[in-house]
Amino acid sequence: MPAGIPNQLSFAMHPDTRILHAGYPSNRTPGPYLPGPAFAGTYVAPGDPAQHPLTYGRFHNPTWLAWEAALAELDGGEAIAFASGMAAVSAVFGVVLQPGDTLVLPTDCYYTTRILARDWLPKLGITVRTASTRADALGAHLAGARLLWLETPSNPELEVCDIAALATAARREGCLVAVDNTTATAFLQDPLALGADITMASDTKALTGHADVTLGHLSTRDAELATRLRTWRTQHGATPGPMEVWLAHRSLATLPLRQARQCATALALAERLATRRDVARVCYPGLASHPGHEVAKRQMRAYGSVLSFDLVTQERAERFLGSLTLVREATSFGSVHSSAERRARWGGDAVSEGFIRFSCGTEYPDDLIADVEQALG
């Protein structure tokens, strides 16, 4: 590891403190708190390349190394940064699955992950089995499978499954487990500690929280698997830009502060919406009425910044979105600025035309809730 990039911090520290300092130079290292992005496609490396830690821009970058050290601190495993969340998903499928293998996938996971599995994997001789996230239904499809893909809470209906129980069942079948942890982030949920082999996140969203980068990453405690995933990134060119990585690392320090406000606001808003007769249903694992509430309560520190609710018709949903004053109509989620969208406009999700996915930002909670209520009115 290059000079100035620290080893992992003591796990005796509170997670908030570890996140704040993760991947930064030590307090005894002269210079900037966080060195600026290293813009380098090639490095001076005379003689034997094996004698040099940095040789070529597709292989490594000091800015990635600092970011990956921070992610390792957060996830509890070796981290590999990618150019996007989907680049990370592709790497897992490409490294783990071979012709003749079977993938078990949620019917309600991220739409593009489903498209990738549906349109490409069968061409490679890979079988895809699907089931709902709810009630751990995926566990009934593990016989002979090579990889179980989980997403909890799912996007956009926020269904929850028991990671530890499914990981135990998968292990009995010799099946690896990967968890899309994008909605929760590792601040709220620890898939590797719960038994998963790989955790993945689209860092475009809540982890970085400013809607200004496109990034993804994987983490694993299996050193050999980490090497294979890193090799995939190098050979397929799925490398992140140093500027995006630096911005992400800079943003990570405020993750505990952002998530504390966002999760509290999301719960308060969900509780308020659940009392309204003009809202058909509210999806949020923090509600006691949510079918996955007890599991979420067990495996999450809080319930996330995203909630969804159903206004049934396209007309009502669009009238609601057009009446908001603080909330941006945009896809994605997790930003410090609240956003919302009618999910059916994209197609692909089994939701009504009036289904709203809502991402709570860091606005003062009463202001945001008042804006939502006036827009509904």
Image (spheres, rainbow, N blue to C red):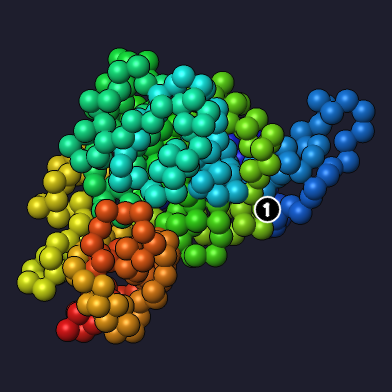
Can you see residue 141?
yes
The residue carrying pointer 1 sits among few (fewer than 14), some (14 to 19) or many (20 or more) residues within 10 Å by Cα, namely many
Along the viewing direction, whichever of 353 and 146 lies nearer the viewer: 353
Residue drawn at (56%, 60%) of the image: 213
350 and 372: which one is in front? 350
Q: Position of residue 276 (x, y in %)?
A: 9, 72
Q: x and y percent of residue 301 in the render?
A: 27, 46
Position of residue 228 measured from the top left corner of the image (x, y, whole percent) = 60, 26
- Label 1 SS: helix
> Mark 1 highlights which residue?
242
Residue 341, above or below 250: below
Q: Which image quarter holds the C terminus?
A: bottom left
* Front residue of 50 and 181: 181
Tell whether 354 sits left or right of 258. Answer: left
Q: How many marks?
A: 1
Quarter of the view holding residue 272:
bottom left
Q: Nearer the viewer, residue 285 or 79?
A: 285
Quarter the N terminus occupies: top right
Residue drawn at (30%, 22%) of the image:
142
Judged from this view, the residue extending furthest toward the front is 123
Image quadrant of residue 270?
bottom left
- Name the residue: 46% across, 26% down: 126
Question: Residue at left 74%, top 52%?
Answer: 38
